[in-house]
Image (tube, rainbow, N blue to C red):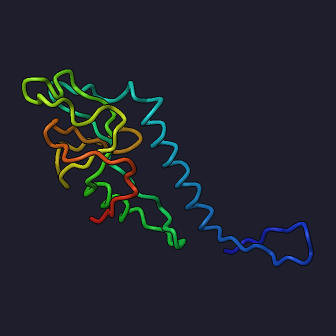
């Protein structure tokens, strides 16, 4: 079903917007809100890592490409499972201890990190999936996760 929006001027063409596109945009907004909520307000509900473990939120690509294509949910879920990039949400008390890492920590809370494709333990919680990684499974840190080509 195609809906036509009215415009203020009669010289303009009516804007055409698909009802299905509206539904995708609403779902994307809900999912983005859950992602932001998980990073900020509901961080106290996250599991507290013990020992040398990190809690990492895997990067989730946008549902709409630059060209305007809408990516299906199955593809997005596969990409998140196979993601090699994530945001550090919490660190255990023994992460990057001075004996094991004399140069200092490789990352800190709030950093975007790169790790092996299927590293860590995966857990589903309200708002998304998280991973528990060991501190030595972090391969690198990056500024912006969208700079990395994400393939599954």
Extreme-top residue of the structure: 93
Which is more toward the observer, 145 or 103? 103
Extreme-right residue of the structure: 10
> Is 110 left, or right, of 23 in this rendering?
left
Q: Is residue 71 above or below residue 131?
A: below
In the figure, residue 98 lies in which quadrant? Answer: top left
Q: Is residue 152 above or below residue 133?
A: below
> Is 93 left, or right, of 69 in this rendering?
left
Q: In the picture, which quadrant includes the C terminus? A: bottom left
> Is 100 left, or right, of 82 in this rendering?
left
Q: Residue at x 15, y 31 (%)?
A: 103
Q: Is residue 70 above or below residue 144?
A: below
Give the total number of marks visible in the rendering.
Answer: 0
Q: Residue at x 55, y 61 (%)?
A: 24
Q: Residue at x 48, y 40 (%)?
A: 36
Q: Residue at x 48, y 49 (%)?
A: 31
Extreme-front residue of the structure: 103
List x then y, in percent, for residue 104: 18, 29
Q: Is residue 79 above or below residue 127?
A: below
List x then y, in percent, for residue 11: 90, 78
Q: In the picture, which quadrant includes the N terminus? A: bottom right
List x then y, in percent, for residue 5: 79, 68
> Is 142 left, or right, of 94 in this rendering?
right
In the figure, residue 102 lies in which quadrant? Answer: top left
List x then y, in percent, for residue 77: 34, 58
């Amino acid at each position: 079903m195609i809906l036509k929006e009215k415009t203020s001027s009669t010289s303009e063409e009516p804007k055409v917007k698909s009802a299905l596109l509206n539904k995708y945009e609403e779902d994307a907004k809900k999912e983005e809100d859950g992602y932001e909520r998980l990073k900020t307000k509901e961080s106290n509900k996250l599991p507290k890592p013990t020992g040398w473990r990190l809690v990492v939120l895997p990067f989730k690509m946008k549902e709409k490409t630059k060209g305007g294509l809408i990516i299906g949910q199955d593809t997005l879920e596969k990409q998140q499972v196979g993601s090699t990039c994530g945001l550090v949400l919490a660190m255990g008390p023994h992460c990057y201890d001075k004996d094991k890492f004399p140069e200092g920590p490789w990352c800190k809370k709030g950093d975007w990190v790169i790790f092996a494709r299927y590293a860590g333990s995966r857990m589903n919680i309200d708002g998304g999936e998280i991973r528990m990684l060991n501190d030595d499974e972090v391969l690198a840190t990056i500024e912006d996760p969208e700079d990395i080509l994400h393939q599954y």
